[in-house]
Image (spheres, helix red, strand yellow):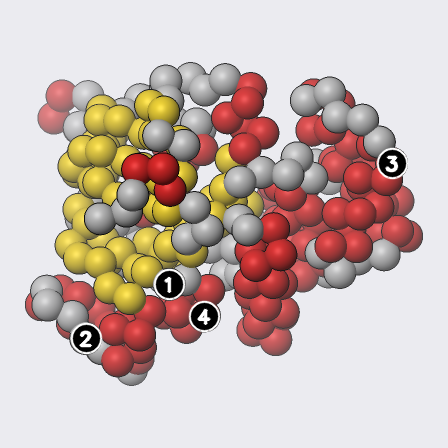
């Protein structure tokens, strides 16, 4: 049991459905999970199991859910306040789609600072670019002038620039070349240590989740089947038959 004062993100009986009448489909079914401050927690499962839907609800991008979402022990309303969005940021799967094609890097980083009334905007932009391994010259480039790895570094910088407590990571390396994936994972691991961040990551890649996360929840058909440590995932230790098959198939 995680002490109450350490809880950062929590869902209680979270359920999400899409459609009406005979077309109604239960996508997330009664999911409860808890992340302590500083946790790196992974949600894994096959496509369509509901893991990204949970992330979108936590981020405030989907307000149509049942159950409760808590941040820092306080239940959040479906439509979040400005402070929540400063503290909880999301890094999306495809950095090219998440960055505006006609905005230079400096504009993409300036926008959240302006919306939230931060001072020292120029120095904050320089600092966060340096933190993700990019020099100051990158601030004047457009997304199409960047490689995939550089675009994802900018996307991470945009999430970090407001100094959040939590990063929600939606398959942050799946759109990248294998050689670049390791660089981004190592960067994320270093940033979590340096900034004492809490991570909730969605992925279907066991190598990715065990590299970055301490605890892993297995999802199937909208339900959370079981929770394992990274060591148990690597060792193929699981109680549920579905989890055993999923781990075996992922290693094949």
Q: Do the residues labelled 2 and 1 touch (CB within 8 Å)?
A: no
Residue marked by disc 4:
211
Q: Is mark 2 on a helix, strand or loop?
A: loop
| Nearer to us in this view, 98 or 217 | 217
Q: Is residue 166 left or right of residue 207?
A: right
Please report whichever mark, 1 or 3, sits nearer to the chain's N-terminal start: 3
Return the x and y of residue 122 as percentages of the image width and height: 87, 36
Residue marked by disc 2:
237
Q: In this view, does 16 lie to the left or right of 191?
A: left
Residue marked by disc 3:
122
Q: Is residue 21 visible?
A: yes
* Cα distance in 3D space between marks 3 and 4: 34 Å
* Cα distance in 3D space between marks 2 and 4: 17 Å
| Nearer to us in this view, 74 or 58 | 74
> How many dots with numbers?
4
Please report whichever mark, 2 or 1, sits nearer to the chain's N-terminal start: 1
* Cα distance in 3D space between marks 4 and 1: 8 Å
Q: Dot 4: within a 10 Å radius of its alpha carbon, few (fewer than 14), some, or many (20 or more) residues?
A: some
Return the x and y of residue 250 as percentages of the image width and height: 30, 74
- Quadrant in which residue 206 is drawn: bottom left
* Cα distance in 3D space between marks 2 and 3: 49 Å
- Quadrant in which residue 182 is drawn: bottom right
Q: Are marks 2 and 3 in contact (CB under 8 Å)?
A: no
Residue marked by disc 1:
214
Q: What residue is shown at x 19% (from left), y 75% (from top)? A: 237
| Nearer to us in this view, 192 or 146 | 192
* Cα distance in 3D space between marks 1 and 3: 35 Å
Q: Is mark 4 on a helix, strand or loop?
A: helix
Q: Dot 3: within a 10 Å radius of its alpha carbon, few (fewer than 14), some, or many (20 or more) residues?
A: few
Please report whichever mark, 3 or 4, sits nearer to the chain's N-terminal start: 3
Q: Nearer the viewer, mark 2 or mark 1?
A: 1
Return the x and y of residue 213 as percentages of the image width and height: 41, 62
């Amino acid at each position: 049991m995680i002490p109450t004062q350490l809880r950062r993100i929590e869902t209680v009986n979270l359920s999400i459905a899409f459609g009406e009448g005979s077309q109604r489909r239960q996508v997330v079914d009664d999911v409860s999970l808890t992340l302590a401050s500083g946790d790196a927690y992974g949600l894994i499962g096959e496509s369509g199991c509901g893991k990204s839907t949970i992330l979108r609800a936590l981020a405030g991008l989907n307000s149509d859910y049942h159950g409760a979402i808590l941040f820092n022990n306080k239940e959040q309303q479906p439509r979040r306040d400005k402070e929540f969005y400063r503290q909880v940021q999301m890094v999306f799967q495809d950095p090219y789609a998440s960055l505006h094609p006609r905005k230079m890097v400096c504009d993409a980083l300036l926008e959240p600072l302006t919306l939230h009334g931060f001072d020292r905007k120029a120095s904050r932009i320089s600092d966060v670019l340096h933190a993700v391994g990019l020099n100051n010259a990158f601030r004047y480039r457009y997304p199409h002038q960047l490689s995939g790895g550089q675009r994802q570094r900018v996307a991470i910088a945009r999430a970090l620039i407001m100094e959040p407590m939590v990063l929600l990571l939606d398959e942050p390396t799946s759109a990248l070349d294998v050689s670049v994936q390791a660089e981004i994972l190592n960067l994320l691991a270093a940033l979590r240590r340096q900034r004492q961040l809490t991570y909730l990551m969605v992925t279907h890649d066991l190598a990715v989740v065990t590299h970055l996360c301490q605890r892993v929840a297995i999802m199937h058909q909208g339900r959370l089947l079981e929770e394992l440590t990274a060591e148990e995932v690597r060792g193929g230790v699981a109680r549920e038959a579905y989890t055993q098959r999923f781990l075996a198939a992922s290693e094949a």
